[in-house]
Amino acid sequence: MNYYIGIGGTGARVAESLLHLCAAGYGPNRLKLFIIDPDEGNGNLSRTKELIARYQTARRHLQDQAAPGFPLFATEISTPDPLVWSIFEHGNTRLADYINYANLKSADRPLHDLAGLLFTQAELREQLDEGFRGHPSIGAVVMAEPDEDADPWRSFWTDVEKAQKPGDVRVFLAGSIFGGTGAAGVPTFGAPEMIKFHPRAKIDDATSKVQLGACLVLPYFTFDTAGATGPEAQRLFVTAADFPIATKAALQFYNEKDLAYDQLYLVGDSLAQSVGDFSPGSAKQENRPHYVELAAALAAEDFLLQPEGENPSGRYYIAGRRGKEVGWQSLPLTHDAEQVTARRDLLKRRLVAMATFAYAFLEFGYPLLDTPPGDVDYAWHEDHFYPKKGVFRRDESRDPRQPEQKAVLTAVKEYSERFLAWAAALDEGADGPVALLNRSRLLNGGDTVDHEQELAAIGTFLRESSKELDFNHFKNLLDQPTTLSDRLSPAGKYAGLFYEAARRFAEENYAVTPTPGRAGATADR
């Protein structure tokens, strides 16, 4: 059983990258996830929540009926309700309210004085609905006692109690260690009694049902604080200038504290690219995706895909780029040196196929559904979706334009839009450090490139040489014989046909051919 717990805004953004990896077929067979964030209105969190809903809708109608091994939305992702542990039961909560600071003066004067010593009056008065604003000491206090009788923790502990063997449940947490929520949550939940050796997880005093991993996300971005004006400028918030000292203190804490993590991954970037304008929280805090979040998601994959019983603790591994550029060779994929090449090939093949599919489906597949079936002059469409039933009749039961079928394909369309936007956001242009997918070919401003005007765009997604096959070649691949599950609905078959054509196109155009065996394939836990 696999769990991902994202803590704070960075944890939500890592979840976004993890979802896209799973959608492309690079993930475990099953994954349960939830988010910890007091700022439920956070724009990063809202984006991730919406993405999860799109993923689950698309998968429910496609993957459940697909043949085994079909990569599209391969991971079964389940979430509790609510998805987010927002910590506080009521809005407008202050730390003073949470610890009953006013009443402590008469009820327990020494404790009142201790709280006054540990926290400033500004910290005690700060409303926490938008997170802990770079003050992890506040977050550590309020996260230490989660309600185990309410979701998401109730579902989590129910699953843990069902486990039988040591390490049966793999739990991976991710969050930044230089801000507020993540910096508070990652060490708090790393304490032995919180998860690893919680009474419901222990087999005995030295053995746990839980194998616990985490990604400590180090500083990797900056933002413009010029937007902090008016009342916001007087409130608590952390700036990029605070990141180094906060990180140094956090790493010293991890070095000295006896935490229960089996494996820790540290990911950061000294280039510190800007991810947008300043916002201390709420809906305005929506940063563009960053490749460090992809690297953190790959760390989660490495942890979750390890063979059962494997726990390479007590060892140190390091990965980094040579020079400024971040290419496919630079991405950290696994601690297993023998699997690096196979994993890299698989990741590249899956992401390029997914990008090709999303582009082709948005530019050609979905718009084609607005054309009446009798007016579509493509052999593949007639064979699969509008075959002859007699001399003068057609079988309309296979038409993906039927309302229920169209709704499924609309969910696929909406997810594809988000995937392309994410893939394009990782790229900063020809002069940027990331050399994975080519933003200028995936998107043109905020819209997809018009394939009728840019026939070659589909063959130039990677920032490397290719055969530059064009969209006409992709259309020809749709006519090639394709074996799809007979259980697929018309919508599932329609999306599956486009995916298989995209996979073939990517393999031909970019020479990303299948690797022998199933190295890096999904793990059934």
Image: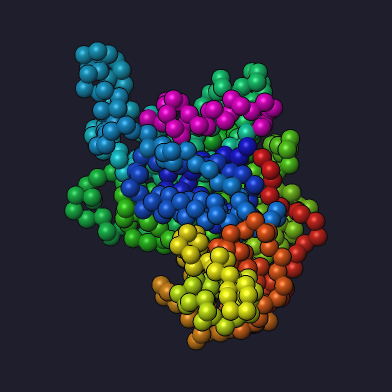
Does the magenta run of residues contain 145?
yes
Q: Is residue 79 above or below residue 71?
A: above
State the image coordinates of residue 357 (x, y, percent, origin top left).
58, 69
Residue at horizontal 43 percent and vertical 49 percent from the top: 49
Camera-side residue of 409 and 340: 409
Q: 285 left or right of 342? A: left
Q: 355 left or right of 445? A: right
Residue at horizontal 45 percent and vertical 74 percent from the top: 370
Question: Which residue lies most toward the right here?
Answer: 516
Q: In this view, does 154 lie above or below 23?
A: above
Residue at horizontal 24 percent and vertical 13 percent from the top: 107
> Which part of the image, by quadrant, shows the C terminus?
top right
> Which part of the image, by quadrant, shows the N terminus?
top right
State the image coordinates of residue 248 (x, y, percent, origin top left).
48, 43
Q: In this view, does 314 lie above or below 231?
A: above
State the image coordinates of residue 305 (x, y, percent, origin top left).
68, 45
Camera-side residue of 316 and 345: 345
Question: Which residue lies most toward the top here?
Answer: 107
Asked if residue 460 can be seen in this view, the reply is no
Question: Which residue lies most toward the front here?
Answer: 391
Report the magenta residues as a range. 142-168
Q: Is residue 277 above or below residue 46?
A: below
Camera-side residue of 364 and 248: 364
State the image coordinates of residue 258 (x, y, percent, origin top left).
57, 28
Does the magenta run of residues contain 229?
no
Residue at horizontal 58 percent and vertical 70 percent from the top: 395
